[in-house]
Image (cartoon, rainbow, N blue to C red):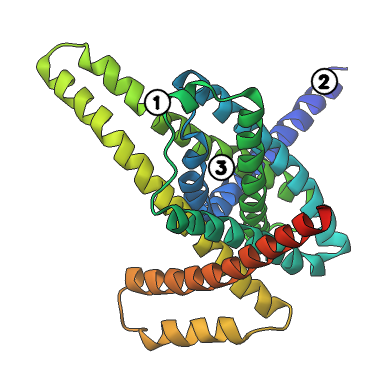
Amino acid sequence: MSSSFFALLDDIAVLAKAAAASIDDVVAGAARASVKSAGVVIDDAAVTPQYVQGISPKRELPIIWKITRGSLLNKAIIIVAILLLSVWAPWIFPWLLLLGGTYLAFEGAEKLWHWIASRHGEEHSVEEVVERSETSEKQIVASAVRTDLVLSTEIMLISLANIDSDSWGMRLATLIVVALLMTVAVYGSVALLVKMDDAGFWLRRRRPRALKVFGTWLVKAMPWVFRTLSVVGVVAMLWVGGHILVVNLAEVGVPWLLDLLHTITESIHGAPGAVIWVVDSAVSAVVGLAWGLVVVALVQLFGRIRARVSR
């Protein structure tokens, strides 16, 4: 009886060691995958704050929480879908990414077009901010979650491509860890950013004087920070969308844009890595802008045709 008991303890110890090793493998795999997708995560963090501009301060965190829940649901659906598709239809991934790249390019180009058409960015009066309806907030959340769906798909696909294990369970566990880490990183950062001005007002009422000065600086700086993030967000959508288009067009048999990009970056091969990255990103952004403007024009044309037909 006692020998059986100790044998059971040995089995438990072996299982515990195996579980610990598996956890280590998952964490290591998640770290590698997270590093590879860091560029898209930065873009996601830059894009998201623009969706909470013009919202009453009391509604900022609830709106961000709603977007976060939508992002988690997106990632859950994406993880299941890409794991199944990786077994049954891996050929569909480039086409899905082309659709996602087109959507991001369209979003970025449309925002840029509105800025040019109005000659300034969208500003919201105090009355507009206070009187935002529940329907308006739902539209904001829906728009943010749609953009998140594209960026999350890119993050998860990059992560899947950088998981070494062939084990279905290990890949699932790694993707779950990446999804949680990325969501917390992006929306935690966004929540901190949008509440910085509130922190500044709080510090202005504190002592010593250095805190008051720092609080005043925060309050004055945040509008500029958000204007900058709005620009970065649009550039990020064009850059990421363009890069997705260039890479995945090559995957479906249209390699000349990717060849052109490689030719341009190879021509400055001796330059610092940061310069090569900027050039690569700039070319991708130009592709995204060009394609996005084409889609904007088609959407506007379709809208006008539909309006005439409905008269």
Residue that mark 3 sits on: 182
Residue that mark 2 sits on: 5
Residue 86 vs residue 249, the one in the foreground: 249
Looking at the rendered structure, the kind of residue marked 3 is Met
**Residue at image location 71% in from the left, 31% down from the top:** 13
Instruction: Report x, y in % for residue 126.
Output: 41, 25
Q: Could you give the CA–CA distance between mark 3 and mark 1, rounded to whole angstroms?
A: 20 Å
**Image: 15 above or below 37:** above
Q: Nearer the viewer, mark 1 or mark 2?
A: 1
Residue 25 vs residue 244, the one in the foreground: 244
Check if mark 1's residue and mark 2's residue have beta carbons within 8 Å: no
Q: Nearer the viewer, mark 3 or mark 2?
A: 3
Residue 273 vs residue 14, the one in the foreground: 273
Check if mark 3's residue and mark 1's residue have beta carbons within 8 Å: no
Residue that mark 1 sits on: 195
Assign the N terminus to one quadrant of the image: top right
Check if mark 3's residue and mark 2's residue have beta carbons within 8 Å: no
Q: Left or right of 183: which side holds 236?
A: left
Q: Is any atom of residue 193 visible in this view? A: yes
Q: Residues within 10 Å of mark 1 (few under 14, many from 20)?
A: some
Q: Is any atom of residue 39 visible in this view? A: no
**Image: 4 above or below 264:** above
Looking at the rendered structure, the kind of residue marked 2 is Phe
**Image: 61 above or below 170:** above
Instruction: Report x, y in % for residue 146.
Output: 67, 45
Instruction: Say whether disc 3 or disc 2 marks the residue closer to the N-terminus.
Output: 2
Instruction: Report x, y in % for residue 144.
Output: 60, 41
Residue 302 vs residue 104, the one in the foreground: 302
Look at the numbered disc 1 and give the secondary structure of its residue.
Answer: loop
Looking at the rendered structure, the kind of residue marked 1 is Lys
Look at the numbered disc 2 and give the secondary structure of its residue.
Answer: helix
